[in-house]
Amino acid sequence: MSQATTVFFDLDGTLLEMHTDQFVENYLKELAKFVGDAFESKQLISWLWDSTKAMIINKEADKTNEQIFIENFVKKSSTKKEDVWPIFEKFYVELFPNLSHYTNPSPWGKKLVEAAKEAGYRIAVTTNPVFPKEAIYGRLAWLELTPEDFEWVTVYETSHFTKPNLEYYREVCERLQVAPEECIMVGNHMQEDMVASQLGVKTFLVTNYMEDRGEPTYQVDQRGTIEELYQAIINRQGVFAKA
């Protein structure tokens, strides 16, 4: 068995304590309110969901998630990108940073990252890249973290796949030039995070805000609370044990 050198941290529900579905629901309401008269709220949310689903089912490796999202949104809404995207960009700059009250940020996220670094691991944020970088970097900021704290952060501008597509994890490994067997995926979602085990990635399922749709199920090498994850990292236990 290869010794792990790299830790992939999921963000929503893992480093950032939150119920993802609730957060997304509130975020979309805030976005619809911000856009205001430009679109009817329910219609806008429908287009956003449709465009997000288009990213999730995409298998075209030559297009980024951003390209898929924009193509779908423009087609569904019969708008031009230059007419609507400045409104979205303004939302992410002006309002999104103030939405942390829809989550439960705690010091644990930063402590986990620091512990993994001190233990000598390379680290990446492997959050589902269905958001622009401003939204993902903004959520890191709620934890007093920045993109520079990591070797890689998956965002929709540079990613070509989403979870639970195995190609998403394969792409991250290729970016970091690391073998899947050298990686540990730390996440709270059975289907989106633990699927990485099918590539040979070791897995740690965080249970505080665990999500499980029932099936399919995947190999979980270790599970525990955020606090137990922290102890496993600093004490090099379980998947974090030295070979």
Image: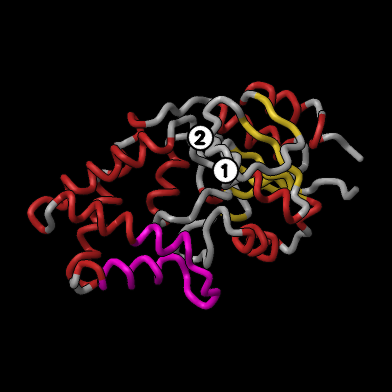
Q: Nearer the viewer, residue 60 or 30?
A: 60
- Residue 51 as seen in the image, left or right of residue 140: left
Does 105 sit left or right of 124 as displayed? left
Along the line of sight, the residue nearer the viewer: 143 or 209: 209
Question: Is residue 195 within the magenta segment?
Answer: no
Q: What residue is at 69 percent from the left and 32 percent from the top? A: 115
Disc 1 marks which residue?
10
State how far apart marks 2 and 1 are (Cα).
8 Å
Residue 101 rendering spot, x and y as whole percentages: 33, 29
Relative vertical location of residue 131 with respect to residue 109 in this rendering, above or below = below
| Residue 57 percent location from the top left of the image | 48, 63
Q: Is residue 68 left or right of residue 186?
A: left
- Is the image coloured rainbow, by chain, by secondary structure, or in one colour? secondary structure
Q: Measuring from the top left, give residue 238's x and y in whole percent.
A: 81, 31
In the picture provided, is 65 more to the left or to the right than 30? Answer: right
The image quarter in which residue 187 lies: top right
**Residue at the far left in the pictured view:** 37
Q: Residue at x 62, y 26 (%)?
A: 226
Q: Hey, what amino acid is under mark 2?
A: Gly
Residue bearing mark 2: 13
Marks 2 & 1, CB-CB < 8 Å contact: yes
Chain part drawn in magenta: 51-75
Residue 57 shown in magenta: yes
Of the residues shown, which amino acid type is indicated by label 1? Asp
Point 31% across, 40% down: residue = 25
Label 1, secondary structure: give it. loop
